[in-house]
Amino acid sequence: MASKQRLLIDFSGDSDQAIGLLYALQSPKVQVSGIIVSDAEPDRGIQLARRLVDQVRPGEEIPVMAGTQQPLFRGEADRAADSVMTSEAVTFLTELVPDPDNPLTLVTLGRLTTVAKAIARKPEWLQAVQRIVVRGGAIRVPGDVTAIAEANLHADPEAAAFVLAAKGPLLFVPLDATESLGLTDEQAALLAKTVRGTTATGKAGTVKSVLGAMIAAVAPEQIETERLKLSIDCHSLLSRGALIADLRAKPSAGTDADVCMAIQSEAIETWVWQLTEGEDRA
Amino acid sequence: MKKVILDVDTGIDDALAISYAVHSPHLEVCGINTTFGNITVEEATKNTLQMLELLGATHIPVYQGSSRPIVRELTGKARLFHGENGLGNVVLPEPTATAQPESATQFLISTIKANPHQVTLITVGSMTNLARAIMAAPEIVTLIEQVVVMGGAVSVPGNRTPVAEANICADPEAAAFVFQSGIPLTMVGLDVTMQTLLTRDHLREWRALDTPLAHVFADMCQVYMDAYATVGNLRGCGLHDPLAVGVVIDPTFVKKVPMHVEVDTSGGASDARTIGDRRANPAKPANVQVCLEVDHERFVEHFLQHVLGH
């Protein structure tokens, strides 16, 4: 019996990342089991997610909940309420129970704070997920916030390092794997408009890596992975948030994790084409 | 002839680089500065004097440099690669000459000032002497022709850590200081040096020549290659330091890309990484010419033709 791939999606609420949500909701192979919005202002993301669910899967009960609002470490002056409260999403994750007949994949499209806090609270829930697909990092290619760091890991390096150290079933999807996906800035902007319904910028690099992470989550047969020793820099002014892979002939430094190195892009390009062409005609 | 000063931590590939430079008809080696790195500075001085006597080049003065990094404590030596004495445990006769009374830093400053826009410095060890010279006499930044640095790795893995190269590891603050000083800098890093290869076949050819120098180099490089094999490089050893000399002899051996490069000094996982901004729109203007491609066949052939002299 071909059962659907169950998916939990943790995103920041922005429209570029919501394109990944749209992709999952539209995929006939996927059952979206929950949507987490990890953002300082989760309400806008929650509204956006609910609207997309209503549009694509009307009548379907998909929990949409707030994750952690702030990264693990932040300035003293910036203390938000969620530092003393457990977010709805952390509770949700820690209450997951294994269901071997219906494997569950968690995809993080934004920073890893919510996942880190849930692991800290009750690591046993990791048994309930078959895969955690992490959109993040840049190994051989330049970063997108600094010369070497990618935005998601840079936004909360300590959370990412904590999750890596927990040795869950991680699959990193770094910019290395998604840069070559065929997607123009115009298509990215159109996709962003599709989810936002208003003018939204749509950065091709972000949209490509979001869709790349979704492919890695729902169609593992379309990706190539490598097991690498990884570390995440949390200490350096210059290198903070960098994903470091030990690529020496005899690697010795870091924690083993799977890394997506290449993605077959035809499926994603067809999906993007259909959606953006439709938008053009509308 | 191009005036060059070598700054070495002699070391096996340093010895090759010295021999290559001394035998090149295009270079006038004004002097050799020593530093710590592969070994202590005292050992580097002794090994350099011994090498010059073996080469019959005792007219080249040797200046002893810094014994420790500008900020940190001195850390361990690279015995695995360079043997206990730095020369692959090949024992050469005790040197008859001694180092000059002047320090490496003083020599560097005075030579650059006496020959404005004519001196090229080639550093193949820690960058400590140069950092101290710039601290002491910032005007040399505009008076030197250029600095060619063997060190760092921008687009390839490190050799000391996943991201850091050994010469930068020896004194990260010195490297960081030099890189941000505005001095004209060419970086000959692992990006290109790991593409150059001295093989066991080359060593057999040297032994067949049956000269004292060829035997010494073959014996030293044997140790170096065995060390390479233990870290997974089975085909031979990289010609790191000689390539820095080669780039001065013939700049067309490499392709350079102007880039903004900063050195990490955090002491953590990224310590001593040379971070090149390879983004389409880098945040800061270029401060280094980074060698990213090398015509390794042409370089290795040239090196083999000249390293042993005539």
Image: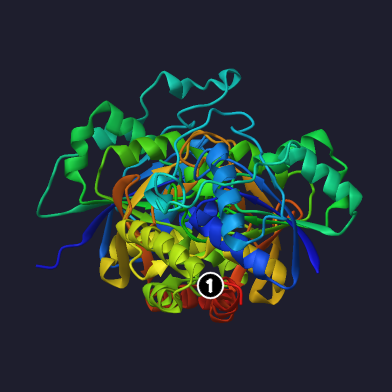
Q: Describe the element under mark 1 as helix, strand or loop.
A: loop
Whether residue A22 is visible here, answered yes or no, is: no
Residue at figure coordinates x 72%, y 56% from the top left = B59
**Residue A244 image position (x, y, % from top left):** 44, 49
**Residue A132 image position (x, y, % from top left):** 29, 49
**Does A160 appear above or below A229?**
above
Quarter occupied by residue B55 = bottom right
Q: Quadrant of the N terminus of chain A?
A: bottom left
Density class for disc 1 (Cα within 10 Å; few <14, some 14-19, many ≥20) is some
Q: Nearer the viewer, residue A269 or A59?
A: A269
Circle 1 residue = A183
Q: Is residue B166 left or right of residue B203?
A: right
Q: Is residue A167 left or right of residue A271?
A: left
**Residue A20 image position (x, y, % from top left):** 43, 58
Q: Quadrant of the C terminus of chain A?
A: bottom right
**Does A175 appear above or below A280?**
above
Report in which chain the residue with disc 1 lies: A
Q: Nearer the viewer, residue A186 or B91?
A: B91
